[in-house]
Image (cartoon, rainbow, N blue to C red):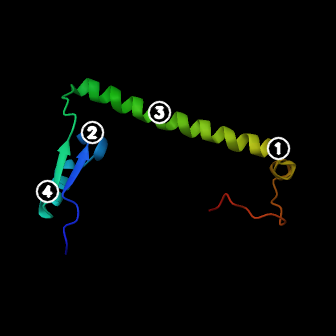
Amino acid sequence: MENKIKTIVISSKDRFIRFGYDWFEKFCEKFHTKIMIVTNETLSPNEELVQDMISILHVFSYRLYGLRKYKNQIKEDEEIVKELQNGTKSNTRTDTTDK
């Protein structure tokens, strides 16, 4: 096996891999790959918790924003509106929500 990756550069250990960093570090050592942490700031447990909560809120806010797009598409498509009102599916179009 050829070792192709010599160094992985990351901004923060927690942003690279949330859980099991020590295991991943040992895994990389097995293949002679170094992990270089560019910003090695030490945060208190409270600061880490706040950053994690902000990250979670950020992800879910973008999900909600993305759902608005589909809501507008449903409003524009009369066939979908009729299906939702009647509780039936149309056989004329392909249902892409199951994919």
Question: Which residue, given by chain and number where applicable, does mark 1 sit on?
Answer: 76
Identity, as a three-letter code, of the amino acid under mark 4: Lys
Residue 18 seen from this side:
no
Image coordinates of residue 14 in percent, x first then y, are 27, 40
In which quadrant is the C terminus drawn?
Answer: bottom right
| Residue at mark 4 to residue at mark 3: CA–CA distance | 31 Å
Pointer 4 or 3: first along the chain: 4
The answer to whether residue 23 is above or below residue 64 is: below
Q: Label 2 neighbourhood size at 10 Å, few (<14), some (14-19), many (20+)?
A: few
Instruction: State the image coordinates of residue 41 (x, y, percent, origin top left).
Output: 20, 29
The residue that label 3 is drawn on is 58
The mark closer to the camera, 2 or 3, is: 2
Q: Mark 4 points at which residue?
A: 26
Q: Name which residue type carries label 3.
A: His
Give the image location of residue 33, x and y in percent: 16, 58
Q: Is mark 3 on a helix, strand or loop?
A: helix
Q: Distance between the residues labelled 2 and 1?
A: 43 Å
The amino acid pointed to by label 2 is Ser
- Name the N-terminal-most of marks 2 and 1: 2
Residue 54 visible somewhere in the drawing: yes
Residue beneath disc 2: 11
Residue 15 to residue 43: above or below:
below
Q: Label 3 crowding class (10 Å Cα cut-off): few <14, some 14-19, many 20+?
A: few
Rendering quarter of residue 68: top right
